[in-house]
Image (cartoon, helix red, strand yellow):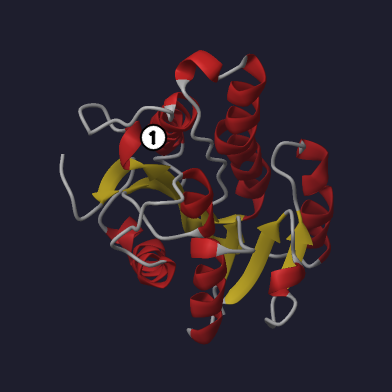
């Protein structure tokens, strides 16, 4: 049985991803600050706040005690704030980067000793993080942090290209999730969380046969 670890698993794409992975017979380890929505699913879950690296300890101890190998890691957790740049304080940048960049990097670093050499780390970025793509006011902290995720992915792939695992990033367009609704209450995205979760799971399980160190745009709009 293959094992997948999903961060940001309590709602939106993460929750749908856990449900779908479970239906397809994967062993699911779910990480989220709020694990209550996961209690109805037959999976292993840990309350993890990616802005606090100490909160990863129970998850790591579990991997050690169970001698658990990870086949797939999906860095799905993210923080999004829609704030005009003139009002985007140091604390706002810090809170977004702590989750989207520092927390993502630390989760990946601590998970790597348990990763299969033929495994796959998929980090969820955003179209806003791609140079030359359409940009939106109010997302200076969020989109720049997602650009950092893309660069991290390229660096990891280079560093581990001889040993594995593979690393890729998916740059998502707008998806109708709770996080999007909170940041843009009047906007309706063309893609549902369940639809995107199905794509992400398929790519996570198959994409590393064809890609390593790449960022793939996943959006039905351009540029």
Q: In the image, 196: left or right of 28? A: left
Furthest toward the front, the residue is 186
Label 1 residue SS: helix
Q: In the image, 87: left or right of 162? A: right
Placement of the N terminus among the 4 image quadrants: bottom right
Q: In the image, 92: left or right of 216? A: right
Across and down, in percent, residue 45 comes to 74, 67
The answer to whether residue 99 is above or below residue 47 is above
Q: Nearer the viewer, residue 181 or 51?
A: 181
Residue 154 seen: yes
Residue 165 seen: no
Across and down, in percent, residue 180 comes to 46, 51
Q: Nearer the viewer, residue 178 or 37?
A: 178
Local packing at callout 1 (Cα closer than 10 Å; few below 14, some 14-19, many 20+) is many
Q: Nearer the viewer, residue 134 or 102?
A: 134
Q: In the image, 148: left or right of 38? A: left
The answer to whether residue 189 is above or below residue 112 is below
Q: Residue at x 31, y 49 (%)?
A: 173
The answer to whether residue 78 is above or below residue 61 is above
Q: Residue at x 48, y 84 (%)?
A: 24
Across and down, in percent, residue 79 comes to 57, 41
Residue designated by label 1 = 150
């Amino acid at each position: 049985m293959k094992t997948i670890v999903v961060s940001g698993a309590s709602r939106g794409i993460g929750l749908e991803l856990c449900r779908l992975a479970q239906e397809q017979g994967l062993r699911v380890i779910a990480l989220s600050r709020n694990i209550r929505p996961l209690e109805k699913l037959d999976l292993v879950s840990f309350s993890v706040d990616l802005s606090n690296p100490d909160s990863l300890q129970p998850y790591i101890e579990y991997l050690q005690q169970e001698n658990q190998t990870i086949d797939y890691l999906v860095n799905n957790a993210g923080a999004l704030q829609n704030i005009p740049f003139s009002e985007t304080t140091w604390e706002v940048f810090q809170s977004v980067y702590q989750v989207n960049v520092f927390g993502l990097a630390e989760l990946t670093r601590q998970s790597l000793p348990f990763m299969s050499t033929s495994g796959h780390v998929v980090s969820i970025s955003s179209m806003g993080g791609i140079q030359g793509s359409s940009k939106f006011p109010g997302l200076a902290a969020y989109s720049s942090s997602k650009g950092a995720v893309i660069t991290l992915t390229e660096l990891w792939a280079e560093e581990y290209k001889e040993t594995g695992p593979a690393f890729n990033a998916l740059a998502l367009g707008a998806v109708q999730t709770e996080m999007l609704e909170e940041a843009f209450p009047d906007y309706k995205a063309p893609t549902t969380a369940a639809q995107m979760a199905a794509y992400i799971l398929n790519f996570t399980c198959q994409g590393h046969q064809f890609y390593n160190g790449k960022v793939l745009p996943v959006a039905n709009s351009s540029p």
